[in-house]
Image (cartoon, rainbow, N blue to C red):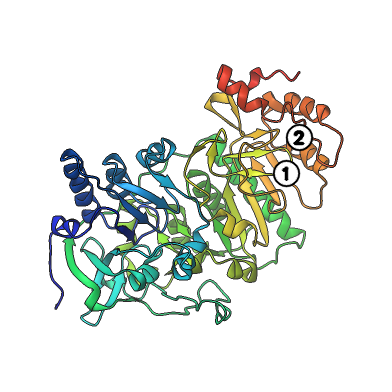
Amino acid sequence: MAYKKISAEEAASLINNEDIISLSGFTATGCPKAVPTALAKRAEEEHAKGHPFKVGMYTGASTGESADGVLSRANAIKFRTPYQSNSDSRAALNNHDMHYFDLHLSELQQYLRYGFLPKPDFAILEVSDITEDGKAILTSAVGIAPTIARLADKIILEFNRYHPKELAGMHDIYEPADPPYRREIPVYSPSDRIGVPYVQLDPKKVVGIVETNLPNEIGAFTPLDGVTEQIGKNVADFLYKEMKAGRIPSTFLPVQSGVGNVANAVLGAMGSNKEIPAFEIYTEVIQDSVIDLMKEGRVKFASGCSLSLTSPVLEAVYADLDFFKQKFLLRPQEISNNPEIARRLGLIAINTALEADIFGHINSSHVLGTKMMNGIGGSGDFCRNAYLSIFTTPSTAKGGKISAIVPMVSHVDHSEHSVKVLITEHGVADLRGLSPVQRAETIIENCVDPSYKDILRKYLELGQKGHTPQNMNAALAFHSTFLQTGDMRNVDFK
């Protein structure tokens, strides 16, 4: 090839203090690894000399240890968006060692094109193949790759031989035109192909190729326990009842599911419920449970932004690509998370809440109202526009010392107007058509842990007169009590 082969260290040496880098990938899959690691080492060396060295960073979503982890520990990130899930990154942003601004994942690409944010100096992309005329085949995720490849001044490629060249054809790369010229995005079913299978690069921008052979950094899921299994069963049973009642078509609807252990359990339970017909998925993250369901014929097709699979499962997919290439499409996140498509397809959106309140507001991102956990991610893209918006959460945490359902959430990511159903291991609260008082009574009765039911009923009785009977003197008493005593059950409304 005509491209220059360079080492990761040589690539890192091209990046300067105050530059803005942008990475391919979505979750810890499809992300570059060697160059960010070398860049972290360079930052540490510069800091040891007394020189400043920090970069801005755009990503698709979270990244892995070899990006967020090493760069955060090296104090090498000046600002970052739109989502993270690394403990070192979380510590840095909560300590204000980096600036972080949360953003709906569907919006970042257009924010960059609109000029709302400064364009990146470097796009660092992980690819499985590249042609001399700049047709790049990505690996196991897309993220924001098409936009940053076009906007960045320079491109560095990590040619990762862990991912087979035969991935060509699994990606569907499409960028919508910007207003006022944007047309409808022509996705009418999850399997519709609307773009090309490669990211078109300008070969003149490519300053070097770094050859690697590195696996993704997706950790294993926590084994299912009784709580997560019961949440999954409650979701599956509720959807079956909705279908039998005629509120979901008998052919079912495409499903969007969030990230994590609960989401994996929900999809597994839906697949196990043979009363639910085989279904399609239109989502951002395709997780392990989807692969088994595809083999069993329970998932017909999955459109997403990334294959966020553990290494053994991803390797099994790669070993049977002829089968799975007919079952997947990987798209840019402004398409996988697009509100227009979510509304048109009639998605059943199932996302995880960090905290909910008795009136149906959802906190997806902040612990005790101040500390960022991961971010809003794509949940807002889907829940506001879904046919049916469901949020799930275990009812308690820390052995019952924290109630996930409180009088008033400490941070609002999704308002009551977007939340249709709340489900915990205890049951289902269908909030459609209910007033605030009715929502509160339904959530307390069906979703709250027994140890908190009477406490929340007492709070509701203390509510000030009005449409939504909050008590401003006690609305955050659960949180303040936990900070003071370490157990929300010690709350004493006065």
Left or right position of 356 against 145: right
Percent across and percent down for residue 468 are 81, 40
Left or right position of 276 against 80: right
Left or right position of 314 against 277: left
The amino acid type of the residue labelled 2 equals Glu
Percent across and percent down for residue 338 are 55, 67
Percent across and percent down for residue 55 are 30, 52
| Label 2 element class | helix
In the image, what residue occupies the spot 77% across and 30% down?
471
Residue 151's disc is: none
| Among the 4 quarters of the image, the one containing residue 360 | top right
- Does 185 appear above or below 44? below
Q: CA distance from mark 2 to mark 1?
A: 8 Å
**Cβ–Cβ under 8 Å for marks 2 and 1:** yes
Name the quadrant of the N terminus: bottom left
Is residue 274 at least partly visible in the picture? no
Q: Which residue is mark 1?
A: 429
Which class describes the residues within 10 Å of circle 2: few (<14), some (14-19), or many (20+)? Answer: some
The amino acid type of the residue labelled 1 equals Ala
- Does 456 appear above or below 386? above
- Does 311 appear above or below 126? above
Q: Residue furthest right?
A: 465
Front one among 117 and 362: 117
Q: Which residue is mark 2?
A: 445
| Among the 4 quarters of the image, the one containing residue 51 | top left
Is residue 474 at least partly visible in the picture? yes
Front one among 202 and 491: 202
Name the quadrant of the C terminus: top right
